[in-house]
Amino acid sequence: MLGFAVVLAISAASMGIAYLGFERVSAGVASYRNSVSEADLARNIDRELISYRALARYYVVTGKEDDAKAIRVIMEHTSKNGEPRILKACTYPLTAAGCVKRIYTNLAVIDVTPQGLFVIEMIPGLTLEKLQTLTEPKLQLASHWQALAPPVAPEARAA
């Protein structure tokens, strides 16, 4: 009978320790989920800020307010696996169809028109044929296309 009581006490103690350990693991998982959620939010804010800066620059250069209000997308041209991210049809739920006017990627700048997708800028050394292999819908080269130039850092102001 004494042996049974000892086994019962040891079992109860190990279950108590396991319960307290589970609380720590559960708190750790919750903390991890919060940090991932915050990182996603920060990444989205970064993307929105980049988009806002690009639109502000465009408005300052062109003075076209209507164009500055148009929806533009900033994205990587392909997935990590090299698959096209610019597709013929959206795979995500849409909030508004046909509202994107321009796509900025790490390889090109593409205008979205009713007549199709027109490449207006490409990185130097990239051909339309190579870009087409990385893009699902048909691309057309705009008549006014140019090589994509890297941004120029603003000069420091005198104090």
Image (cartoon, helix red, strand yellow):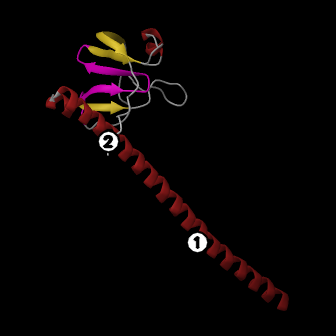
The amino acid beneath tag 1 is: Glu
Q: Quadrant of residue 90?
A: top left
Measure the C-alpha gap from mark 1 to mark 2: 58 Å
- Whether 118 is among the magenta residues is no
Image quadrant holding the N terminus, namely: bottom right
Q: Secondary structure at mark 2?
A: loop
Residue 19 in the image, given as x and y percentages of width and height: 63, 74
| Segment tinted magenta in the rendering | 96-115
Q: Quadrant of residue 25?
A: bottom right
Residue 16 position within the rendered picture, expressed as x and y whole percent measured from the top left: 66, 79
User: Which residue is drawn at the image coordinates 43% and 13% (left, top)?
Assistant: 132
Give the image quarter of residue 122.
Answer: top left
Spot occupied by residue 146 in the image (x, y as percentages of width and height): 35, 13
Using residue 54 as the reference point, say whether residue 16 is left or right of it.
Answer: right
Name the residue at 40% across, 32% down: 75
Residue for point 31% across, 15% down: 118
Q: Which element carries disc 1, helix, strand or loop?
A: helix
Task: Kindly give the residue lying farthest to the front in the view shown.
Answer: 159
Q: Earlier in the sequence, mark 1 or mark 2?
A: 1
User: Residue 124 — which label?
Assistant: none
Q: Nearer the viewer, residue 66 or 96?
A: 66
The residue under label 2 is which amino acid type?
A: Ala
Identify whether 8 is placed above or below 111: below
Pointer 1 residue: 23
Please give the residue where the numbered disc 2 appears in the rendered image: 158
Between marks 1 and 2 in the image, the one whose residue lies nearer the viewer: 2
137 w.r.t. 74: above or below: above
